[in-house]
Image (cartoon, rainbow, N blue to C red):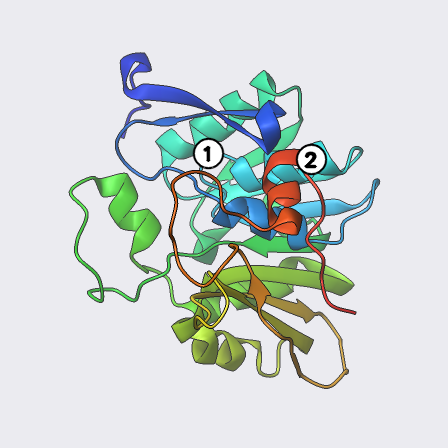
Amino acid sequence: MTGFPEDELTRNGFLGGRVQLWQPMRGYRAGVDPVLLAAAAPARGGEAVLELGCGAGQALLCLGARVPGLSLAGVELQAPYADLARRNAQANGQDIDVFEADLSALPEALKQRQFHHVIANPPYYKAGAHSQAHDDGRKLALGEGTPLADWITAAARRLAPKGYLHMIQRADRLPDMLAGCSGVLGSIEVLPLAPRQARAAELVILRARKGGRADFRLHAPLILHQGTRHDRDGDSYRAEISAILRDGAALPWPA
């Protein structure tokens, strides 16, 4: 598979323009979910972060823009997206080691490294559980090819002791995530993301720790939008969510 032609790319700004991302006009295009994922990771300067399935690099670039001095690496299965991630890192003045590989066959150079944080935004749908996309890249990005348990196992193997995994997923995949963490990661916390007040959570962010022994915690939902319904055009994000998406603020993880 070759890279994307120049005339099939757009350049889009994130974090109020602090991050500029080249991405395909057709195929998988990054939204707010990777930004929220990056904002949830409590990384500090000098730490190492790995993203599994990094796509064009949005989450890593947003995290690097918020926290200077990180050592960033990403794994991406699809060559065109891996190439875009490298290009986007260079364009944003960030240094990211991008490995083109399957999670089940990581390169030896990566297997020799450990990370303080692993982040992941795996495909949301089980194979055959959603309408098939016409674009191959989008199809792979949305439809699960590797079970969630394998994503979590790969993350656990790359985490340093006491390191954290953060994963964003559909709420109905939470049982699969919890099952994947069993015997592998502990101190599990789940933060539901609800679109509005009085609406069920559609997404969750899972936090788990290597070697963690704390009790399971299910937090109250983080509400993304103002009001109980969409009744006007434009930006309706709540102030703390807008601060994440526009200003690069950290996600207010519950204490």
**Residue 144 falls in image quadrant:** bottom left
Q: Which residue is mark 1?
A: 56
For mark 1, does the 10 Å Cα neighbourhood hold few (<14), some (14 to 19), or many (20 or more) residues? many
- Position of residue 135 measured from the top left corner of the image (x, y, whole percent): 20, 39
Q: In the displayed structure, would residue 128 be above or below residue 9?
A: below
Quadrant containing the N terminus is top left
- Position of residue 250 measured from the top left corner of the image (x, y, whole percent): 72, 48
- CB atoms at circles 2 and 1 under 8 Å apart? no
Which of the two residues, 162 or 92, is positioned nearer the viewer here?
A: 92
Question: Residue visible at 67% across and 27% down?
Answer: 95
Q: Earlier in the sequence, mark 2 or mark 1?
A: 1
Apparent side of residue 135 relative to residue 81 in the rendered image (left or right)? left
Q: Which residue is mark 2?
A: 64
Q: Amino acid at mark 2?
A: Gly
Which of the two residues, 165 or 19, is positioned nearer the viewer here?
A: 19
Apparent side of residue 211 relative to residue 175 in the rendered image (left or right)? right
Q: Secondary structure at mark 1?
A: loop
Question: Residue visible at 61% across and 49% down?
Answer: 241
Q: Which mark is residue 138?
A: none
Apparent side of residue 201 relative to residue 111 in the rendered image (left or right)? left
Q: Amino acid at mark 1?
A: Ala
- Position of residue 12 measured from the top left corner of the image (x, y, whole percent): 46, 25
Q: In the displayed structure, would residue 67 be above or below residue 124?
A: above
Q: Secondary structure at mark 2?
A: helix
- Position of residue 167 measured from the top left corner of the image (x, y, whole percent): 55, 61
Question: Residue visible at 52% across and 46% down?
Answer: 34
Quadrant containing the C terminus is bottom right
Q: Is residue 105 visible?
A: yes
